[in-house]
Amino acid sequence: MTSTSVHPDVAETADAIATMEIRGAAAIADAAAGALAAQARESDADTPEALRAELREAARVLYETRPTAVSLPNALRFVMADVEGDDVEDLRQSVLASAESFQRDLDQAQGRLGEIGANRLRDGDTVMTHCHSTDALSCVKAALDQGKHIEAIVKETRPRKQGHITAEQLREWDVPVTLVVDSAARRYLNDVDHVLVGADSIAADGSVINKIGTSGLAVNARDRGTPVMVAAQTLKLHPDTLTGHTVEIEMRDETEVITDEERAEIQGDPDGFDVVNPAFDVTPPRYVDAIVTERGQFPPESVVVLMRELFGSETKRPWEA
Ligand code: RUB
C-alpha cells in the first residue's frame, strides 16, 4: 500500500502538520488522532485485516511528518493501543472510541496541568514566554481564572515568530503583553518572575526539548536567578529515551531564515555561506526548576519515574508492519 491509499483527510492532516499549518505538540497530537479516526470512519475496507493495514499506513504517513514532538507518535500509540474487533464495523467503532477518548483526555490533561501550574504563579507576577505553547498558556489562563493579575514579556521566537500567536492569545485574555525580539530576552529577565515554556519532548534524564532558543533562555535565566517552569503534559514524555535513544532535532528549510532573493545573491558569491535552521534545542535538566504535568509538578530529574510508570519498558510502533 502506498501513501496515496490513505484517506484524503489523513493526507491533508499530514501535509498541514509538515507545513506547520497545524503546529505545537498538543495540537499535532489532537490532529493525528482525528486523522486516524477519519481513516477508520471513511474506510471501505472489507476485512478487519485490511482496515488494520490502512490504519498502519495512515499512522506511518502521519508519523513521518515531523520528528521532534513525541506527542505525535505517542498519540498514534495511544489511539491504536487497544483497538479490537472481529469484523470491520467493530474495529471501526473501536478506533473511533479510542480516538475520541484520547482527544478528551488530552483536553482534560491540559486543564489539570494548568491548575497545577497556576499554583506557581502569584498575583502580580510577570512571565516570560518563548514560542507558543498551549500547555504553558493553560497555566496563565488558570491563574487568571483564580483572579490573579499576570503580565507577560513575550519573545518573538524567530524564525517563524510563533511568539506573536502567544501575544495575541494573551491580549484576548486582557493580559498586558510586551513583545521583545529574542536577543532582548536577557535584558528583561530581571523584570520577570518566571520563564514559562512548553515542551515538544522530555527525555528520561529530564532534558527538555522545545523550540530553538529555549536552552539559551534557560541558561540566562539561571544566571539571573529567574526560575524556569516547563509546562508539559505526560504525552510529551519520550519513552524511547528510556532505552538510550536520543530525540531527533528537526532541521527545517532555509527559506524560513532567508528569502529566495537573498539566497540568489549568496549563490553568486564564491564565498557565500550556508544556512542551517534547527527547529528545536535541548535544555539540560540543571537549568529547569520544575516540569508541570497533569500528574503534578516534578523536578526534571524525577520524570524518569513517571515515564516508567506510564510507558513501561517497551514501546510499540504501530506505524510499522
Ligand atoms: C512549538 C513548540 C511548543 C511546544 C509545546 O513548535 O515548540 O513550545 O510544541 O506546545 P512548532 P503545546 O511551532 O515548531 O510546532 O504546549 O501547545 O503542546
Image: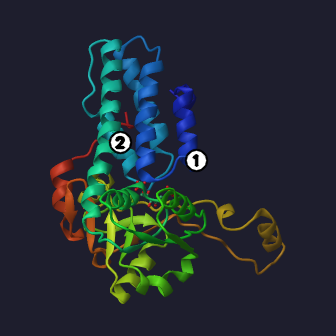
Quarter of the image where one finds residue 92: top left
Q: Which residue is mark 1?
A: 21
Residue underneath mark 2: 75
Of the two numbered discs 2 and 1 in the rendering, the one whose residue sits closer to the viewer: 1
Q: Secondary structure at mark 2?
A: helix
What x and y, as percent, mark residue 317? Answer: 33, 41
Q: Which quadrant, please, contains the C terminus?
A: top left
Residue at 55% of width from left, 34% of height from top?
11
Q: Classify 10 Å Cα crowding around label 1: few (below 14), some (14-19), many (20 and above).
A: few
The answer to whether the residues at label 2 and label 1 have Cβ atoms under 8 Å apart is: no
Residue at the spot 57% in from the left edge and 62% down from the top edge: 164
Which residue is at the front of the view, 152 or 247?
A: 152
Please provide percent x and percent y for residue 24: 47, 53
- Residue type at mark 1? Glu
The answer to whether mark 1 is within 8 Å of ligand 1 is: no
Count all numbered tags in the image, as a single digit: 2
Q: Is residue 285 among the parts visible in the rendering?
A: yes
Residue positioned 21% across, 47% down in the render: 314
Camera-nearest residue between 150 and 307: 150
The location of residue 201, given as percent across then percent down, is 36, 59
Measured in 3D between alpha carbons, the distance from the residue under mark 2 to the one under mark 1, in whole angstroms, is 18 Å
- Seen in the picture, residue 222 relative to 118 is either above or below; the reply is below
Residue at the spot x=34%, y=60% of the render? 139
Ligand 1 lies in quarter: bottom left
User: Label for residue 87?
Assistant: none
Reading the chain from its start, which is encountered first: label 2 or label 1?
1
Horizontal placement of 66 versus 303: left or right?
right
- Amino acid carrying mark 2 in the image: Ala
Q: Position of residue 90 (x, y in %)?
A: 30, 15
Q: Is residue 280 above or below residue 222?
A: above
- SS assignment at label 1: loop
Q: Is residue 9 left or right of residue 122?
A: right
